[in-house]
Amino acid sequence: MLELKNVSFNVDSDKGNLEIINDVSLTIPDDTFTVITGPNGGGKSTLAKLIMGIEKPTSGKIIFNGTDITDMSVTERAKLGVGYAFQQPPRFKGLTVRRLLSLAAGSDLPEDECCGYLTAVGLCSRDYLNREMDASLSGGEAKRIEIATLMARKLDLAIFDEPEAGIDLWSFSVLVESFKSMTEGRHNSVLVISHQERIMSLADHMIVIANGRVKNQGTKEEIFPTLMDEFTNNCDFRDKKEEK
Amino acid sequence: MEKIDKSLLAEIANMHEIPAGAYNIRKNGGGIDRRSTANIEIVTKEDKPGIDIIIAPGTKNESVHIPVIITETGIDDVVYNDFYVGDDADVLIVAGCGIHNSGSDKSQHDGIHTFHIGKNAKIKYVEKHYGEGPGTGENILNPVTIVEQDENSTCEMEMVQIRGVNSTKRDTKAQLKAGAKLIVTERLLTHDQQEAYSDITVELNGTDASAQIVSRTVARDTSKQVFHYDAIGNEKCRAHIQCDSIIMDGASVSSIPAITANSADAQIIHEAAIGRINNDQLVKLMTFGMTEEEAEEVIINGFLK
């Protein structure tokens, strides 16, 4: 179980001290598929980075399975079973896809197993095993390999930052299936940042983040119907235009 | 053979036992073991130190190993090795130099290699440079490589400097006739106060000659690297130079591109990049449970692989 207690995150900028995350408290229970959604720039990715330890909160506490991990490094959190798939995966010159998957798993993976993970993200595995995870891969390919690196691990909490971004519609249903099966056995809890209806439909629990705060949370049946209103009525510019 | 000799040979030439095929092992300035085969003859030069390696036309799937090891301090070894590769031959040549310096004097090896590659012949040349030892004496390697490629020949060169070489000045010059193809991969790591200079000049003198030069280097600590690569297209030809360096700590890397076209049909490209390890790369590997140092090693080893 993951608990965030009064977590805030501020950054210094030209415009002074900016509040990116503002006093967020929430709980991600075990054995759940949680989707975080909300408008762009609302603080979702920052929240995921705070959980992984890539950013450190300005104030507040992060408790993971009863342990205070607020001051722990990324490495320490990874060892406790937290994993994170980047929204924009970094590229590595000279590292093959197979090596990357093996590094993720923590041991040399047999070819069959690597192929299994790649197939699960909609890639024809044999074409990719020995390819380098470098700039020669398209955005969508790199993104799918990034998701596969989390499949190769057995995690207590797997975090995915907008896994659908850059994935074509044709492969999307394969990916949704993979996400569905991920909670069934592989990972204990899955936390996905997403704007995609089909990913949201997998959720046991949904959290809406806007302006750095938890705007709403609950089951998908409770949250889903409210989402259209959340995002359509807050555009000042459009309102003004209509007044003319 | 002593234990140090064996470990140096394994490091530079991947030789764990006497190799199949032709070989010549040079130690501390003199030959210690040699074998010629029916198709590959190794002959001692009479006018200067070194050997001629004569590969008969049409020789296929054979290899020749010519490693050099230095285990004494204060050795200054200059050697001239000439390769005569007959037409239509297809061979692997493994060279390299390993120095174990346990004293306070400098140990130096300057290998001057000249390749005469016949028509349609194909060679793969692998050269590894490596230094070690508890002494304070410097390990210096200044190789000169001259490549003359006849029509439609292919020469693939992999030149690697792993670690422990205090100073190196590499000078490589190649001349290509029509249809000849040259592929050079240079991989280099410097650390502490080491210095590495590498000059490569390729002249493409015949129609449809092509050259590809790829350099991947890592400069750590306060080491210094300077690269000067030049491709000169004198006919309809293609050349691509790609230099990529990771810079760390207080190191310095200089990459000086030069491309020259003396024909309107020459297509020559130079790309160069120098940069530190990207923070996202480190974080990605740390999310697998690696420490920052472990992640750095994985990135460097992959980059230099």
Image (cartoon, coloured by chain):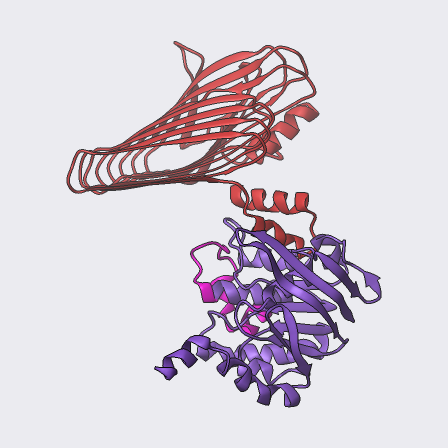
Chain colours: A purple, B red
Location of residue B92 in the rendering, given as x and y in whole percent from the top left corner: 44, 37
Residue, x 57% and y 48% (percent of image)?
B279
Q: Let me know if residue A206 appears in the view.
A: no
Residue, x 60% and y 66% (percent of image)?
A43
**For this rendering, which residue is in front, B217 or B118?**
B217
Height in image: A102 above or below B245? Answer: below
Location of residue A44 in the rendering, given as x and y in whole percent from the top left corner: 60, 68
Location of residue B209 in the rendering, given as x and y in whole percent from the top left corner: 24, 40
In the picture, residue B264 is in which quadrant? top left
Query: Does A64 sit left or right of A219 as displayed?
Result: right
Residue at the extreme front: A244
**For this rendering, which residue is in front, B270 or A2?**
A2
Height in image: B25 above or below B305? Answer: above
Q: Which quadrant of the rendered structure holds the N terminus of chain B?
A: top right
Query: Would you say residue A131 sits in the magenta stretch?
Result: yes
Query: Does A204 sit left or right of B276 as displayed?
Result: right
Residue range (magenta): A116-140
Query: Does A152 sit left or right of A230 as displayed?
Result: right
Residue, x 48% and y 54% (percent of image)?
A134
